[in-house]
Amino acid sequence: MVAYEEVFELKPLEKIHLIDQLLLSLDLPNSELDKIWAEESERRIDAYEAGTTQSTDVYEVLAKYNR
């Protein structure tokens, strides 16, 4: 078990992973929310394919938070 104080010693990506795991442990099925996210995902894909949005390489994002 990780002590509360130890969390602040983690690297940024380790904190993100911890937060993700905590959120997953609380995740309950919600069909309305799933529908909203599916629609948002489609809008984002459409915008990307139309060239109306910018994207960032995953490695650039990871490098930014893995300092």
Image (cartoon, rainbow, N blue to C red):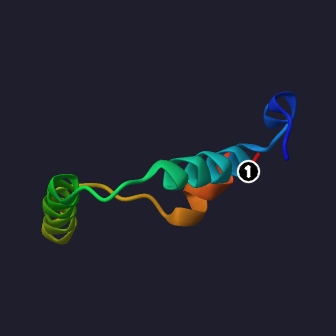
Viewed as shown, does residue 18 lie left or right of 67? left
Q: Position of residue 23 (x, y in %)?
A: 51, 48
- Residue on which disc 1 sits: 14
**Residue 50 locus on image (x, y percent):** 12, 67
Closer-to-camera residue (47/42) = 42
Q: In the depicted view, which residue is nearer to us: 13 or 7?
A: 7
Amino acid type at circle 1 is Glu
Q: Number of labelled discs?
A: 1
Local packing at callout 1 (Cα closer than 10 Å; few below 14, some 14-19, many 20+) is some
The quadrant the C terminus occupies is: top right
Identity of the residue drawn at 71% across and 43% down: 12
The local secondary structure at tag 1 comes to helix
Q: Nearer the viewer, residue 61 or 9?
A: 9
Q: Relative to 5, is 56 above or below?
A: below
Provide residue 40's location: percent of width, then percent of height. 18, 56
Q: Quadrant of residue 8?
A: top right
Among the 4 quarters of the image, the one containing residue 15: top right
Question: Where is residue 29, by image quadrant?
Answer: bottom left
